[in-house]
Amino acid sequence: MQEHAPMRETEVGEVIHYWTDLHVAGVHLDAPLDVGDHIHILGHTSDFEQNVGSMQIEHETVRHAEPGADVGIRVAEHAREHDKVYKVVELEDIGAEQNEL
């Protein structure tokens, strides 16, 4: 049996729109986000995790977005307005990040 490292979630934004035909959530960011980050989208009827595979700002593909940006993220499941978006980080990664500072 494989043990999973402890995880921590940090809120990074909120879904402000969902385009059903595109499977894209519009997210207003309160913290930085990068392509490849693992996120958890949670709301009254939404609850799923995925990696950020692609992200756009104003129809331009970006790999990084800063707080205050409105980004489009292709999502695996239906997201709804006001769903919270959390970045999921393994606790051992947090220690490594702090050592880099």
Image: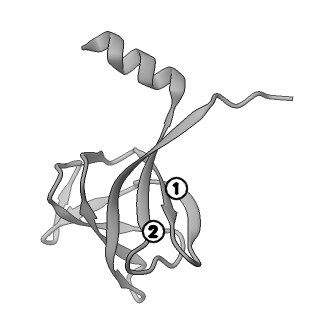
| Residue in view at x 28 percent, y 60 percent | 55
Provide the secondary structure element on which disc 2 rests: loop
Quarter assignment of residue 15: bottom left
| Residue in view at x 52 percent, y 65 percent | 42
Q: Is residue 15 left or right of residue 76?
A: left
| Residue in view at x 56 percent, y 76 percent | 44
Q: Is residue 50 left or right of residue 71?
A: right
Comparing 73 with 88, the one in front is: 88
Quarter assignment of residue 14: bottom left
Looking at numbered disc 2 in the image, what kind of residue is underneath it?
Answer: Val
- Cβ atoms under marks 1 and 2 closer than 8 Å: yes
Looking at numbered disc 1 in the image, what kind of residue is underneath it?
Answer: Gln
Residue 95 position, x and y percent, is 44, 17
Vertically, is 23 above or below 5?
below
Query: What label sits on residue 50 in the rendered view?
Result: 1
Q: Residue furthest bottom?
A: 21
Query: What label sits on residue 75 in the rendered view?
Result: 2
